[in-house]
Amino acid sequence: MAYSSARPRAVVLLSGGLDSATAAAIASQEGFDVYALTVAYGQRHLREIESARAVARALGVVRHVELQVDLSAFGGSALTDAIDVPKDRDLAAADIPATYVPARNTVFLSLATAWAEALGARDIYLGVNALDYSGYPDCRPEFIEAFERLAALATKAGVEGAPLRIHAPLIRLTKAGIIRRGLELGVDYGLTHSCYDPDALGRPCGHCDSCLLRAKGFAEAGVKDPAL
């Protein structure tokens, strides 16, 4: 039997990290049926893909698609190439770190846009953040606003007067603020994974940017990280 619901549909980019899990929970709380999209982009480990599956099950998404788009064919990042993941970096540094994946969010949003059009959905959610983050250019409000304008021009839905809306509900929150919001919504952060360079058992390194930002967020929120 085909799935039928009176709720509107939203495509949510779900990486398996705490930010995307929170964004998915917000989409559901805001009245959308969630269609989760996880991209296996040739990253150095698949631990976060496992977490995305667990989060999707816990949130009860309508459908979870895992798409293979191997950006490691291009390389150019510590996450997709034989480049060391920076450890114990100064998070206040102005440089863009080696963990930046060229055009990743542009690619991901393009894929989400294609699926949204196919679904007849007008809304896309993603968990980018421009406060407690590593300085990636494709996590800034300017990028989200520009992509929304592009989608309005580049899609049948946009040309016909039903442009897509790109929601980045976490973009101006601190990591602690994100965690508090997720806990209010019942997000199980024990299911999520953030580390860029886990060991063979999937345990976080505790020293990459993502681990440091996660630890900072839980400390400032006054909550123990359930994934540790």
Image: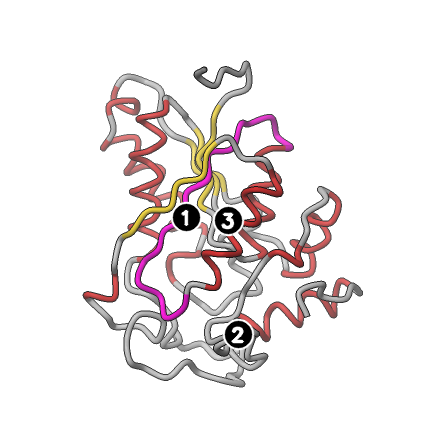
Q: Name the residue under label 1.
A: 38
Seen in the picture, residue 155 relative to 44 is either above or below; the reply is: above
Along the polypeptide, which appears first: circle 1 or circle 2? 1
Q: Are marks 1 and 3 in contact (CB under 8 Å)?
A: yes
Q: In which quarter of the image is residue 216?
A: bottom right
Q: Nearer the viewer, residue 88 or 168?
A: 88
Tell me, yes or no, whether the highlighted magenta stretch contains residue 33. Answer: yes
Of labels 1 and 3, the one closer to you: 3
The quarter in which the C terminus is drawn is bottom right
The quarter in which the N terminus is drawn is top left
Q: Name the residue under label 2.
A: 201
Give residue 149's mark.
Answer: none
Question: What is the three-letter code of the residue carrying label 3?
Answer: Arg
Question: What is the three-letter code of the residue carrying label 2?
Answer: Leu
Question: What is the three-letter code of the residue carrying label 1?
Answer: Thr
Of labels 1 and 2, the one closer to you: 2
Q: Residue at x 61, y 39 (%)?
A: 59
Q: Which residue lies furthest to the left in this view?
A: 73
Label 1 crowd bin: few (<14), some (14–19), many (20+), radius 10 Å:
many
